[in-house]
Image (cartoon, rainbow, N blue to C red):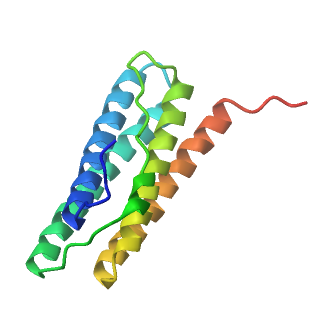
Amino acid sequence: MKDWTHATLDDIIDFAIRIEEESFAFYSEAALAQQGKALPEIVKLLKILALEERNHKDILLKKKEGWRLADVPRAEVGASVQRIVDLPVVHADAELGEVLLAAAAREKGTAALYRSLMALSDFGDLQEVFVDLVAQEEGHERRLMSFHKSLYPAPQE
């Protein structure tokens, strides 16, 4: 994992953009792999999540240019950002349950990243972006876990 101790705000935002790119690819590939195997609503959810991740990337790119134009000071993020987790990887032949759990873990990790970014900023506009992204990523995680629970209910004792 990267050493974030001396990362700049640009470094962190670039990392967030890469996560959104990876998430877009993850959901696009998962939707394709599950086509014809999973319920149509699962495939539809994966496609919707892919589009939402691409939208998150676009938001970050647009805002990043605005922050640069506004000459926002670079932030030293310190050791607190070291807690950003590596995101899980799922193999192409993974079962649907594994895909849903990995996707939920990706969303949880991304929300944690955005909470860290939010804590870095005293800038209202910047905080608003990350507050919105945290809410969206947490919503994605809830939707994925809801589908997982409906397909794989916990055994009754």
Residue 96 position within the rendered picture, expressed as x and y whole percent measured from the top left: 52, 25
Counting every numbered tag in the picture gives: 0
Can residue 114 be seen here? The reply is: no
In screen coordinates, is 127 left or right of 143? Answer: left
Residue 19 position within the rendered picture, expressed as x and y whole percent measured from the top left: 30, 47
Quadrant housing residue 31: top left
At x 25% / y 44%, what residue is drawn? 21
Residue with the most extreme right position = 157
Pick the residue in front: 73 or 98.
73
Quadrant housing residue 63: bottom left
The quadrant of the rendering that contains the N terminus is: top left
Can residue 137 be seen here? The reply is: yes
Query: Is 100 rendered above or below residue 130?
Result: above
At x 42% / y 26%, what residue is drawn? 90
At x 41% / y 38%, what residue is drawn? 46
In screen coordinates, is 127 left or right of 109? Answer: left
Residue with the most extreme top position = 93
Quadrant housing residue 127: bottom left
Pick the residue in front: 145 or 69.
69
Residue 147 position within the rendered picture, expressed as x and y whole percent measured from the top left: 59, 39
At x 62% / y 44%, what residue is drawn? 146
Query: Is 40 rendered above or below residue 137?
Result: above
In screen coordinates, is 57 left or right of 122? Answer: left
Residue 68 position within the rendered picture, expressed as x and y whole percent measured from the top left: 11, 73
Query: Is 66 rendered above or below residue 96?
Result: below
The quadrant of the rendering that contains the C terminus is: top right
